[in-house]
Amino acid sequence: MTAPEQTPTWIKRSMLITDIGFLAYWIATAVQVIPPYAQRVLIDWNWSFLMLDVLAAGTGLASLRLRTATRGLQLVSLALTHAAGLNALMFWALRGEFDPAWWLPNLWLTLFPVAAVTVLLRHRPTTSAGTT
């Protein structure tokens, strides 16, 4: 029998801030605190990320709240977060546009999960005496 898996505090805190940030972004977008794009296609593109971002946030927050089976939910959340950030970066790169206000948060969404997954996959839970 293995001991409970321990996730490093920096990963938990980073996931919490990121997941709350996802939800705050969509609330701010919905009430137009963040103004919509000038072109309809960009508005549609932005809204196409809603489900991906909400799933990333939901699985991340659930993994922080639950006591069991959290590693799988953490990995799913981090993969979804990475996908959201990378897709946004590739879109802006293809358009040849660079706005630090969009690039920096999406670089975070792309790179933070890579570091976190690397740590989570290398971290081996300790085992009880007499088991392997």
Image (cartoon, rainbow, N blue to C red):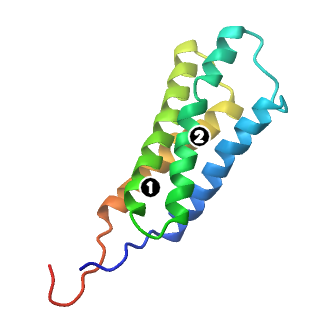
Q: What residue is rendered at 42% in x and 62% in y?
A: 70
Q: Secondary structure at mark 1?
A: helix
* Residue 93 picture quarter: top right
Q: Earlier in the sequence, mark 1 or mark 2?
A: 2
Q: Nearer the viewer, residue 72 or 99?
A: 72
Tell me the tag on residue 28. Answer: none
Q: Measuring from the top left, give residue 52's x and y in whole percent.
A: 53, 34
From the viewer's perspective, is 74 left or right of 93?
Answer: left
Residues under numbered marks 1 and 2 in contact, where contact means CB atoms less than 8 Å apart:
no
Q: What residue is rendered at 52% in x and 53% in y?
A: 60
Farthest bottom residue?
129
From the viewer's perspective, is 60 left or right of 18?
Answer: left
Q: Eyeballing the image, is 16 above or below 79?
A: below
Q: CA distance from mark 1 to mark 2?
A: 14 Å
Tell me the tag on residue 74. Answer: 1
Three-letter code for the amino acid on which mark 2 is drawn: Val
From the viewer's perspective, is 104 left or right of 130?
Answer: right
Q: Measuring from the top left, give residue 30's x and y in whole percent.
A: 77, 30
Instruction: Give the quadrant of the C terminus.
Output: bottom left
Q: Measuring from the top left, give residue 115's x and y in whole percent.
A: 43, 53
Q: Nearer the viewer, residue 98 or 13?
A: 13
- Residue 119 seen by the camera: no
Question: Residue tagged by mark 2?
Answer: 54
Callout 2 crowding tier (Cα within 10 Å): few <14, some 14–19, many ≥20: some
- Residue 53 seen by the camera: yes
Q: Nearer the viewer, residue 85 or 23?
A: 23
Q: Secondary structure at mark 2?
A: helix
Three-letter code for the amino acid on which mark 1 is drawn: Gln
